[in-house]
Amino acid sequence: SYELTQPPSVSVSPGQTARITCSGDALPKQYAYWYQQKPGQAPVLVIYKDSERPSGIPERFSGSSSGTTVTLTISGVQAEDEADYYCQSADSSGTSVVFGGGTKLTVL
Amino acid sequence: EVQLVESGGGLVQPGGSLRLSCAASGFTFSSYEMNWVRQAPGKGLEWVSYISSSGSTIYYADSVKGRFTISRDNAKNSLYLQMNSLRAEDTAVYYCARGMAAGTDWYFDLWGRGTLVTVSS
């Protein structure tokens, strides 16, 4: 079955840039999406179609894609950005969705 | 207010059944694809099932195929998940999520707060 691979954790100091990667063989052909989930809350979409930002999401969140890896970048990290982040894509058949295992972002 | 509200979770014994509901409001429910996504305690997100806006196209994750049935009632602005032959590994918070098509795939732009299903004897 198709898998997306994320690092389990990333740590940064406030004001620095956090980069969270997600790797998958189908990513060159399929869009990637990113969700933020804070403890006890539902996920929130922060990036869609690799690099588009939904309305209401701060400009410090951006996404990029290169080959089999997509990256969520958070510039000028704030304490409120501490959360779990999940990438998501679809398998090549377009009949199922897969999530990465999630990355816990810690703001030191 | 645009929102999704799940209900129907609870404690059920292994092998039992449960029916989850999701009430949509604030948007034209019949125009959107819908999904169920679950999250086991302390674990990551797992997509469970998809249903098209008309209900004519349905997909399931392999882990629930043959046991779970997704359905919708556009007249009632409601989404459902019938869960049969439940197993301990089905224990999770179940989220209702609105789908947005993007080419051959889709993503989730609106989520409910979830309902907890616990499968245990």
Image: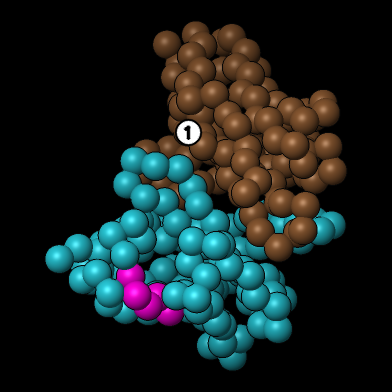
Q: Residue at x 68, y 42 (%)?
A: A33
Q: Which picture quadrant has residue B6?
A: bottom left
Can I make out residue B100 in this image? Answer: no
Q: Which chain is cyan?
A: B
Q: Is residue B87 above or below residue A45?
A: below
List the single residue furthest toward the left: B121
Q: State the predominant SS element of the stretch in magenta.
A: loop
**Can you say whether A14 is above or below B16 in the image?**
above
Looking at the image, residue B3 lies above or below residue A59: below
Q: Is residue A22 left or right of residue B19?
A: right
- Occupied quadrant, residue B34: bottom right
* Residue B84 covered by magenta stretch: yes
Q: In what quadrant of the picture does the C terminus of chain A appear?
A: top left
Farthest residue, direction front? A1
Specify the segment rendered in magenta: B82-86
Q: Colour of chain A?
A: brown
- Locate residue A89 relative to residue B75 in the image: left or right: right
For the residue pair A45 and B40, the one nearer the viewer reads as: B40
Give SS at disc 1: strand
A12 is higher (above) or lower (below) than B120: above
Residue labelled with disc 1: A84
- Res. B118 visible in picture: yes
Residue nearer the viewer, A27 or B65? B65
